[in-house]
Amino acid sequence: MIKKYVLAHSADIQFNRIFGDVKTLIEQAKTDVAITVNATMSMLYWQVGKRINEDVLKNKRAQYGKQIVAALSENLIQEYGTGWSEKQLRHCIRFAEVFPEKEIVSTLWRQFSWSHIKELIYIEDTLKRSFYMEMCKIEKWSVRTFRERVNSMLYERTAISKQPEEVIRKELELVGETGKITPDLVFKDPYFLDFLGLKDTYSEKELESAIIAELQRFISELGIDFAFLARQKRIIIDHKDYYIDLLFYHRKLKALIVIDLKIGEFEAAYKGQMELYLNYLNKYEREEGENSPIGLILCGGKNPEHIELLHLQESNIKVSDYLTILPKKEILLDRLHRAIEIAKSRFSDNEN
């Protein structure tokens, strides 16, 4: 049974301060211990993987490698317990293969847990891996969130993936150095809105209402730094009323975000409408220190030639598809890869 002591008011205030300070010290110590343990174990796993790789690579025989791993695992389990399974040893080997330099590993364990590292090392594409590393650091993803982002093909859906490789590399390096992100790392195409439960036929009003009803999940799909401000925000221009479907604010971009919902395919007139909204917000509602507002037109089809001829890639207006019913992952991934190749081909043609 816990005893509770009754103190005088002034003594009670002093006690609460002392108690709070001691709690802070204990929690900080626990955090420091966890960081130290993670660093020590991550470096150990890398060293184990490196040592096995050195032996296996010398012999260059796959069968020999399998035998070594199996025998090592059996002996290590007898000596140190079940934490040294064949699967764990293969994680160690993969870790040392993907990150062969000790200096990089020393940086990794400061930024990621071993559970995060296990997710990272199985991403084959180097740029894609770098993207997830930087976004994980900035947005402080849990391991569960990390897996969800990878499984949802976040990289393939961001605008950055459609840039030339050198541009992607430089932008990710800049993010790593400054911690600042650009719209190309924020906006996606397409957006997955399957959680709205909409059928084949629905109106813009029904789409908007479904989003408001599932606002938390919609924001999760947009990204963690989006803050909801208004629905059907009324603005008056020349004594005429206009209504912005959804208005958000993005903390890291430091900008208002206008989302315009459209049922059909993108039309040229949508650009003028969005420009009107953005210019109004820029003139009347943009606060000091904020960047220019950004518009996102969500529609049932992009019409890429329209977007190209309207030079929307060079503006503050983004156009994205949304999917209320998701195809099989393989089909969707194939579509995304084709979209990336087409976009990169356009960049190449423009340079030539």
Image (cartoon, helix red, strand yellow):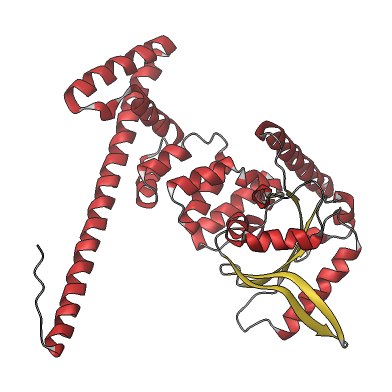
Vertical order, 192 against 69 (above or below) = below
Residue sitting at 39 percent across and 30 percent down? 91
Quadrant of the image for the N terminus? bottom left
Residue 61 visible within the image: no
Q: Is residue 307 visible?
A: yes
Q: Residue at x 67, y 81 (%)?
A: 286
Q: Residue at x 60, y 52 (%)?
A: 170
Q: Is residue 222 left or right of residue 97?
A: right
Q: Nearer the viewer, residue 222 or 155?
A: 222
Q: Position of residue 22 (x, y in %)?
A: 17, 70
Q: Quadrant location of residue 220?
A: bottom right
Which residue occupies the foreground of this view, 138 or 82? Answer: 82
**Residue placed furthest toward the front:** 1
- 90 above or below 340? above
How far across and down, in percent of the image, does residue 125 sit?
Answer: 57, 36
- Pick whichever, 1 or 344, lies toward us: 1
Q: Residue at x 66, y 35 (%)?
A: 329
Residue 98 position within the rendered picture, expressed as x and y whole percent measured from the top left: 46, 34
